[in-house]
Amino acid sequence: MQTDTSPIVPTCRFAPAQPAGDFLCHCAKVTEGEVRSAMAFGMVKTLEDVMSVTGAGTGCRACHCRIQRVLQGLPAKCGGRFDLCGQCGCIGAICHCEAA
């Protein structure tokens, strides 16, 4: 059996060029930790606060669900259609790879 060793090519503009780590907002490159720090310092309490203080959520808006979850004290990842595809790194709602 022959194994394909060709690199995975991102299928959308939201796919990260490098491993995403814990990005909460991929457009603005804001991490979940940055939002949690802003919360700890009392700088943000609402989605609008997060947008103005960190820039997260001001691009495609796919992260609004994750931001709301963090603001509620939950983990950012919900397993929903706005999580990233594990194969191509694209947002699941617009992923076109075979893993979706």
Image (cartoon, rainbow, N blue to C red):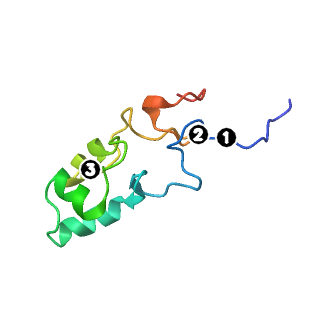
Mark 1 closeness class: few <14, some 14–19, many ≥20 residues within 10 Å? few
Which image quarter holds the N terminus? Answer: top right
Closest to the observer, 81 or 13: 13
Provide the secondary structure element on which disc 1 rests: loop
Query: If you read the primary sequence from the N terminus, does the residue marked by circle 2 or circle 3 appear first?
Result: 3
The residue drawn where x is 27% and y is 42% is 65
The location of residue 5, given as percent across then percent down, is 79, 41
Do the numbered discs 1 and 2 sit on residues whose CB atoms are within 8 Å? yes
Image quadrant assignment for residue 49: bottom left
Q: Amino acid at mark 1?
A: Val
Provide the secondary structure element on which disc 3 rests: helix
The residue drawn where x is 51% and y is 39% is 90
* Residue denoted by label 3: 67
* Residue denoted by label 1: 9
Closest to the observer, 93 or 40: 93
Check residue 33 in the rendering and tell me which mark sits there, or answer none. Answer: none
The location of residue 68, given as percent across then percent down, is 22, 47
Closest to the observer, 23 or 5: 23
In this rendering, the answer to whether 16 lies above or below 1 is: below
Query: If you read the primary sequence from the N terminus, does the residue marked by circle 1 or circle 2 appear first?
Result: 1
The residue drawn where x is 16% and y is 68% is 43
Check residue 88 in the rendering and tell me which mark sits there, or answer none. Answer: 2
Mark 3 closeness class: few <14, some 14–19, many ≥20 residues within 10 Å? many
Disc 1 to disc 2, C-alpha distance:
7 Å
- Tell which residue pokes out farthest to the bottom in this image: 41
